[in-house]
Amino acid sequence: MGTGLAAWASVSRLPTVTKKARKHGDDLRGASKLAVEAITRVTEVVEGMHTTIASGPAVLGKPLSGPARVVNGLVYGGIRGVTRLVGSSIERALTPLAPLLGESAPGPEREAVLAALNGVLGDYLAETQNPLAIEMSLRHDGQPLELDEEALRAALPHASGKLLVLVHGSSMNDLQWDRHGHDHGGALARDLGYTPLYLRYNSGLHVSTNGRELDALLGRLVSAWPVPVDELVILSHSMGGLVARSACHYGDAHAWRGKLTKLVFLGTPHQGAPLERGGNWVDVLLGVSRYSAPLARLGKLRSAGVTDLRFGNVLDEHWAGRDRFARLGDTRGELRLPEGVQCYAIAGTTSPEGRSNPFGDGLVPVDSALGRHDASHLALDFPDSHQWVGHGIAHLDLLSRLEVYAKLRAWLSPR
């Protein structure tokens, strides 16, 4: 297998584009802002537990008197105040220092940490305008592309009329399609002549928020592409498949949808992921007792994107007007696969052939990845020939296993 991966690593790539330098001052400012907020949140949790326990039965200690409660509030309020004061002081100090801190090209380690942070707290980072929040962009070789015809022609002089857009999963980024020396996008460029572009987005935002933004981005891309677009293919992994389905829905009447010919899903939780449903149970169980209830606030730090994975939310109406941390059932309405597009689904399972595994690839069950559901209005009708289950394949292995690529190549090859 190692020899095979080494062979696949020799994929032909489009010309390398110089990576845009990052500002260390922005990183420090974003990190300090996040640290201040983290201390403040934990302080609130500790204060809530202290007040609740001290006000409870005598066996837990003497209840707080009225004046003691006031003092308790003043103490924790003081901690929060000092924390915010320190945070604002850091912000003021970093502003004049930022130019002195210099710049450097983003590395894969920093990009991976940033992607994970956005996956868990991305909605909060965006809401607070934290510099660490990721803005959606289409990229090549880790560099954002300007969606202007002349700029695209300069950046991609060998661009073809066969566009391939790759959409990563939750807490990941565009660079992580290259795994163990293999990149599905690069291999498809070499073997089938596609021009691969990689989406980078804040996976902590609601899926439908990213879907709307991707719809707009694809419209601009097709309009500015330097050669006539013959076909557009979207290859998605995990949450990326939900984002792609959302974009297809919101862009149904837009020009780019007429160019979309094929949509491929790798381990996409179309019907949700058990781990997020388990996380929701943790919230509920912690909230049963007033003594553990303050800890439930920590579980509620996870992002809107993560909670969308509970049932596979794709549209605004799947979550709007509801408490996303409440113990609610699946309230999604019908959303079929996009019309006029050939859709394909690959599921992984860590079990060997002939055995079943309720957890599928470790994160997404096989039934969820293949769109199966007991309710007919929620089931996705992938033709049998457009489904494939890979045995002995974990969730991230879908990005690098050669048998997965063989199936992709067969599906995307001209008939």
Image: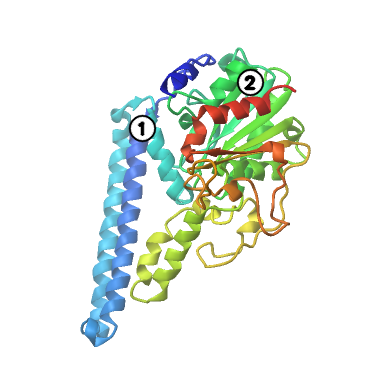
Relative image position of residue 292 (x, y in whole percent): 35, 71
Left/right placement of residue 22 relative to residue 324 reads left
Badge nearest the viewer, 1 or 2? 2
Residue at left 48%, top 24%? 182
Relative image position of residue 265 (x, y in whole percent): 61, 38
Q: Say whether residue 206 is visible.
A: yes
Q: Element under label 2?
A: loop
**Amino acid at pointer 2:** Tyr
Residue 345 occupies which quadrant of the picture?
A: top right
Image disc number at residue 194: 2
Query: The N terminus appears in which quarter of the rendering?
Result: top left
Query: The C terminus appears in which quarter of the rendering?
Result: top right
Q: Are marks 1 and 2 in contact (CB under 8 Å)?
A: no
Relative image position of residue 48 (x, y in whole percent): 32, 71
- Looking at this view, name the residue that lies furthest to the left: 62
Name above or below for residue 36 compared with residue 62.
above
Q: Nearer the viewer, residue 380 or 326?
A: 380
Left/right placement of residue 331 relative to residue 401 reads right
